[in-house]
Image (spheres, rainbow, N blue to C red):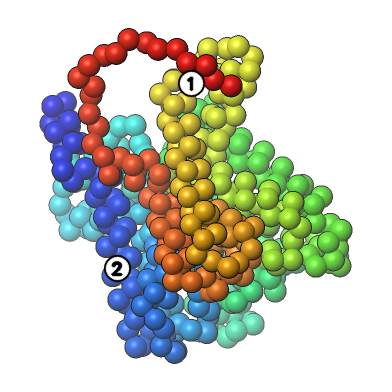
Amino acid sequence: MNLLKQLAYRRQSPPKILATGFLLLIIIGTFALMLPWSTTVPISWLEAIFTATSAVTVTGLAVVDTGSVFTLFGQTILMILIQVGGLGLMTFAVMSILLLGKKIGMKERLIIQESLNQNSMGGVVRLIRRLFYFAITCELVATVILAFKWVPEHGLGFGLFTSLFHSISAFNNAGFSLWSNSLSDYVGSPLINVIITLLFITGGIGFTVIYELIERKKFHQYSLHTKVMLLGTLALNILATFAFFLLEFQNSATLADLPLNEQLWGSFFQGVSPRTAGFNTLDYAAMQDSTLIFTMLMMFIGAGSASTASGIKLTTFIIIILAVYSYARGQNEVQLLRYRIPREIVHRSLSIMVISLLFLISAIFCLSISESLPIFALAFESFSAFGTVGLSLGITSELTSVGKLIIMVLMFIGRVGPLTIAFALSRAKSPLVSYPKGHIFTG
């Protein structure tokens, strides 16, 4: 136990190592994208580091067109950055160590525990191994299925590459597409809608949940976290689909002029995509303000903990709602599915939300000073960056250098996690003095 404490509170703590690892990957990716054979036309250093940050943080916001500006080599670099950033640095580090026949030490297990947001180190190596093979299998199977659609349209070579690129981008919730209008040409395609959404829902549901689904076959055997994620994801996706349809079905710029089947597919895709996937089959710049506000809420919530997605996480949002409900009813405990939620989890959830809102409000405030763009579009861009979603109202390339830097910081914070950033910048210290209780009026 003493050894664990010493490792956890060393100068290079697991949160610091994770944050530093992502930063180094962004730097490496930037230099790779600046290579002359990575682009068809020269790009600036700022454009390169923005693109690398967006890829590593699996966001999808772009200041240059991915399909036309980057060569096949450059797009392959983006795929690698998305894969490593999505599955996590530690996943690839551990797999490399295992392939070399070496053992995983205590320090490495602590970092893995932190990266996967696990409560203990037990079984973390086996968890990573299973998840790595599962992710690769999902992406390859999806590539084969998507190839049936895109090989006839684009030829064997580019069709297979397109299928692989979008499979990796979708599973890792990156939202990068080789087309400037994302997947808008396939708004009514059942195959594209089903495969892409299955990929980013699977990738965003959380590695722990995936592991339990593989290991355990019956619902009653699942942990509380897995049950909440499955039920919460299903409920929120249904709610978001109906909400999008009701808000947009009279908008001629989005749903109104489409056949009914395409209206339903479009509502489903746009309903589930904002929780960090970043793909779109309809133009967000043409949507109602009410739809965009709802989308910002979905981007803020995000998907599952320890997944390829970001946001404050669905479980965090559910805990906060239940905490408010319990307080309104005069209850001292938060209950969920006949379980009592510990206070430290409630406090952690509230901390995550408050820190996240502070980051977002600060970013929007700074953008309102540095940019001469509509505040609503800046707010949407900020929520998209923090949630590492990648949806935009088309202003990303119009941002000033300062604006791009602010969005980059938001993407980095959104991927690494607000609490991880806070822990990485500070050391936990036990108070030396216990003060008397004080009372203050609130509300």
Which residue is labeled 2 in the image?
27
- What residue would you read off at disc 1? 341
Q: Residue at x 16, y 54 (%)?
A: 101
Horizontally, is 128 left or right of 374 in the view?
left
Q: Is residue 407 above or below residue 123?
A: below
* Amino acid beneath label 1: Ile
Determine the residue positioned at 27% across, 62% down: 24
> Which is more N-terminal, label 2 or label 1?
2
Q: Position of residue 443 (x, y in %)?
A: 58, 21
Q: Is residue 45 left or right of residue 354?
A: left
Q: Quadrant of residue 376?
A: bottom right
Q: Residues within 10 Å of mark 1 (few under 14, many from 20)?
A: some
Disc 2, SS = helix
- Residue 31 rendering spot, x and y as whole percentages: 30, 76
Distance from label 1 to label 2 (Cα)?
41 Å
Circle 2: residue type: Ile
